[in-house]
Amino acid sequence: MGARHRPGLADELLALGVNYSPSADVADIPYRDDNRYMWEFEDVMEAGQVVAGVTVQQVRKYASLMEMVNTIDVPGAGDDAGETWILPTEFYRDEETTSLNQQEGREPPPQPYHYAEWDYQMQLERPDWCTVLEKRAKSGDVEMIENIVVKHKPIIGRLKLLIEAMQPQGVQRLRKQEDGDEIDLNAAVRAMIEMRMGEQPDPRIMMRNVRRVRDLSVLLLIDLSESTNDPVLGSESTVLQLAREATVLLADALDKIGDPFAIHGFDSNGRHDVEYFRYKDFDAPYNDKAKARLAGMSGQLSTRMGAAMRHAGSILKRQPSSKKLLLVVTDGEPADNDVRDPQYLRYDARKAVEELTRNGIATYCLSLDPRADQYVSRIFGAKNYMVVDHVQRLPEKLPLLYMGLTR
């Protein structure tokens, strides 16, 4: 009589559809139980992106010219390749205007950043629910930015006067202080006169020297959803074009003031793909490269605002400035193609604003939606937003708004 086969752990896991490696002794569990809900990991994507929260990175290899030429015509791996080859110097074939790197090279997949999202119905955070992918910003024609400066030359002239008033004033002397660095002789003489006359003297006879230095970092976050391609009523420009003009004027003002600033943009295609673009970073100069990236801005997809604000806040909170401001420019309410409940992303964006406030980051929204009063005050607060009814005035409003917030 033969022995009965007793199924082991590997067989039981295999029956449940779980991959099991006896050598590694690690079970690849496709779910997580937190004693409240069963969280399924739906992040299984193609290679180079996220697989159950694990990132697969491509390796760049700088190959020689002969290696590249001999391998190009051989069928190779696709986007799931673990190694990409790049020529250290550009090489052009006969009568071709594009190099081999441009023809054959692929950009490595972006680094994913995972953020929680607030579910107002369950009153719980969905852990690692959204994936933000930093995409490389496309470049455009720098002449477009120069034309914007010429177009709004009268506004720039008025801004220069305000900029001069906002420059740091150096050391400022404060009089009538009870404690200070030195005695205010005029106040001391008046106090002695009051004492001789039998009156109560003013004890504020000191002066204090205070160094007035602007210590502020600002991040301008631009909504780049598909709706920004719509033309503005009564104008030949689109919402995106006016937002670009306003950004250029604000960047020109910030560059003259000297405040550290960054210009970023975002759109989304579901919670797995929140695209994030860096047009100008804090440590990067505002030069022709940054202007070319601003000229290449384009509108597409949807607006998952909460995840984008959390990622912007993670960048902004690393700044050493004592004051930090996140300025959001949007033309509509938060929305995405995988969310049907219109309130869901509104509550999540409100939760993101609360998280940023706890981290010492002030938020302000400049909305281009005439109906924004119905929801934007619930997200950002009653005093932390402005609705621009006439979008044509956006290039003038945005720089003046910033100067009013940071005066």
Image: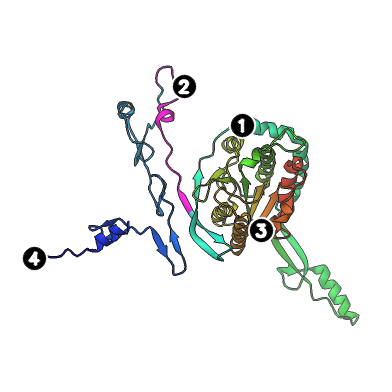
What's the mark number on residue 379?
Answer: 3
Residue extending farthest to the top is: 95
Q: Dot 4 lies on which element? A: loop
- Give the residue type at disc 4: Met
Marks 1 and 2, the one that precedes in the sequence: 2
Q: Is residue 107 left or right of residue 385?
A: left
Residue 338 horizontal/vertical position (percent): 54, 50
In the drawing, what numbered circle is on residue 1? 4
Residues drawn in magenta: 93-113
Q: Amino acid at mark 2?
A: Thr
Q: Residue furthest front?
A: 1
Q: Is residue 21 above or below residue 291?
A: below
Q: Residues within 10 Å of mark 3 (few under 14, many from 20)?
A: many
Q: Which residue is identified by label 1? A: 142
Pointer 1 and pointer 2: residues touching (CB < 8 Å)? no
Task: Give the mark nearest the N terminus, 2 or 4.
Answer: 4
The image quadrant that residue 65 belongs to is: top left
